[in-house]
Structure formats: C-alpha cells, structure tokens
Amino acid sequence: MPLKTTHKKSSHTTSSTPKAADSPIFQAIEKLQGERPWGSFLDAGTGRKSIEWICGLDTERWTAVTASNQMATTVKKAAGTARRRQDRIMVGNWMSEQLLFGERFDTVLLDYFIGAIEGFAPYWQDRALHRLWPHVGDRLYLVGVEPYVLVEPKDTAGALVREIGRLRDACLLIAGNRPYREYPSSWIMRQLGIAGFRVLDVRYFPIHYRERFVNGQLDLCLRQLPHFSDEGLAKAMHHKIEALRERALPLARSQEGLKHGADYLIVAEPMADRHRGMPDAAGTPQSVPSGP
C-alpha cells in the first residue's frame, strides 16, 4: 500500500470533547481499520481517553499498559463495567524485557506514547519501537503531536502556545521532574523503518487549543510550585503563570481558539524478519545491502 499523507481539519483532542469516540483521530483510525477485525488489542501507553474508546470497539480482548499506578487506577475506573474477564490493565515499564514476553497482538495503539517516554524511560525513545515490534501482529497506530515548544511562532496564537509549553517545562524541571519530549512525524517515520515497520498512511490534524488546554497546562505549573526550593522564585512564577493565563484565555475561548501546530496519526505494519535491518555489535539495526 503506498504512503499517503492527508491533512484533515479538526479540533485537537484537548478541546472540550464529550466522549473519546468523538475524537477525530480515533474516528480516522476506525475508518482506516475498515472491515479488518480488531482482534487482540494492545494499548501500550494507556490513558483515560484511549481506554474509553477501546472499550467501545469489537475486540476479542485488550491489554492496557501504563508505568503509573495512578494512571492504572484512572484507567480501571474509566473502563468500568465494559472491562471483561479477558481484559487486562497492567503496570509496567517497556524497558523491561519481561513485560508481555512472547505475546503478540493484532492491533497496537501508541497514543502520545513516544512523547511520554521521557518521564519514565529518558533517552530510550529510539529503542521504543524496536521493543514493541515483536508484539505487533498486524497493525500499529501511532498518535503524536508535532513539537511546538522549540518552534519559532509566526503569530500570536503560536506565541502563546509556545510560551505555555516553555513555562510548563521550566516549572517541571525546577521542581525536579521531567517534561515530555515530543518528536516530529518525520523522526517517527525514520525510526519505524529502522525498527522493522512499513509506514502505510500518515494523517495530520491541525490543532485548535481551547480553554481546557490553557488551564490544564498552567494548573500543572501551579502544582510544581510547592516543590521549588526558592520561595521567592515560586511566588514570581505564580505571578507569571496567572498573567499568562489572563492573556491566553480570551483567545482560547474565541471561535478560532489557539490555532497552532498539528497532531499526527501514522499507520504501520511489521515487515517480515528477512526485511528488517541487521543488528550491529551494539544492537543497532543497519540497512541490509541490496543484491546485484
């Protein structure tokens, strides 16, 4: 199947969406899946929205994995009575080779998974897709967001989104925590090829950040302040957070919202073992030389 690149107008999932099933990205996945059965389903970096959506699919069974005990509790509550006897919620880190050893799933979802790795397995992003390759039996759906913290904005909305992201990351670092590290779709596609996947489709979803995004990110900043060692800095940062909220909310509440950047959906399938890269002594796959 040839590579396709599609730009689709939609609202970002951080807008006030009543149900996970209403997410344009999840809707796109369902259309791309078509008549293909979901079979066994792995939500490799689970969250409330993804598990709510998965519970509405006709799967044989699903397994949801998170590295956070708190998230596991949230996911269990979100699944509620839709969770069947054969469904599992597991707490584990993909750096462990024993996690789901020997298991393969028909469908695998990585929902903002790569960006979240930094908080649980820093500097491991380039190995994540290699680690997951043996578990993908048929289809891999990978959702991410194009980095926006380092990109120089061209308009007011972009400048505000970037400022919120940079302030959030600064607060997390000062408080002794790790911020997420998003990767562009071009990097992801390169890594998919190296890890032994064939990219089938790529779709982009322009983002319109809303009030929920502004308050959520800035409230996260506020929760870091008690962990600052400098009380004066914490007070100054509190003032900065609320001043930024005051500037950002009017635009976020407007019809256009804070229009900036894009989410992406990449569809891939595992290649046969004979088509994968040959590992060198360090375990890094190299390209296979072509024949004469």
Image (cartoon, grey):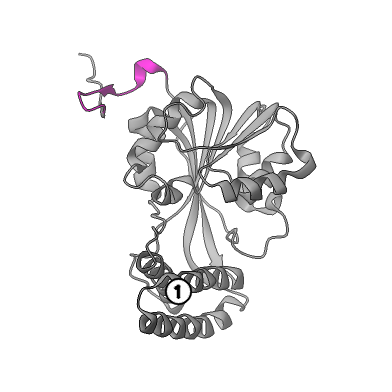
x, y percent for residue 94: 44, 36
x, y percent for residue 105: 57, 25
x, y percent for residue 209: 55, 68
Label 1 residue SS:
helix
Residue 82 painted magenta: no
Q: Bounds of the magenta span?
A: 272-283
Report the front residue among 11 and 60: 60
Check disc 1 and give the amino acid type. Leu
Report the front residue among 262 and 233: 233
Horizontally, is 257 left or right of 240 in the view? Answer: right
Up the image or down, 280 lies above or below 208; here it is above
As drawn, the residue found furthest toward the right would be 81
Q: Residues within 10 Å of mark 1 (few under 14, many from 20)?
A: many
Q: Is residue 27 visible?
A: no
Q: Residue at x 73, y 59 (%)?
A: 18
Quadrant where the C terminus sits is: top left
Report the residue marked by disc 1: 225
Report the front residue among 8 and 69: 69
Up the image or down, 138 lies above or below 168; here it is above
Up the image or down, 216 lies above or below 147; here it is below
Horizontally, is 191 left or right of 91 in the view? Answer: left
x, y percent for residue 170: 36, 69
Q: Is residue 129 visible?
A: yes
Q: Residue at x 46, y 82 (%)?
A: 238
Q: Residue at x 41, y 65 (%)?
A: 172
Q: Residue at x 65, y 40 (%)?
A: 30
Quarter residue 212 falls in: bottom right
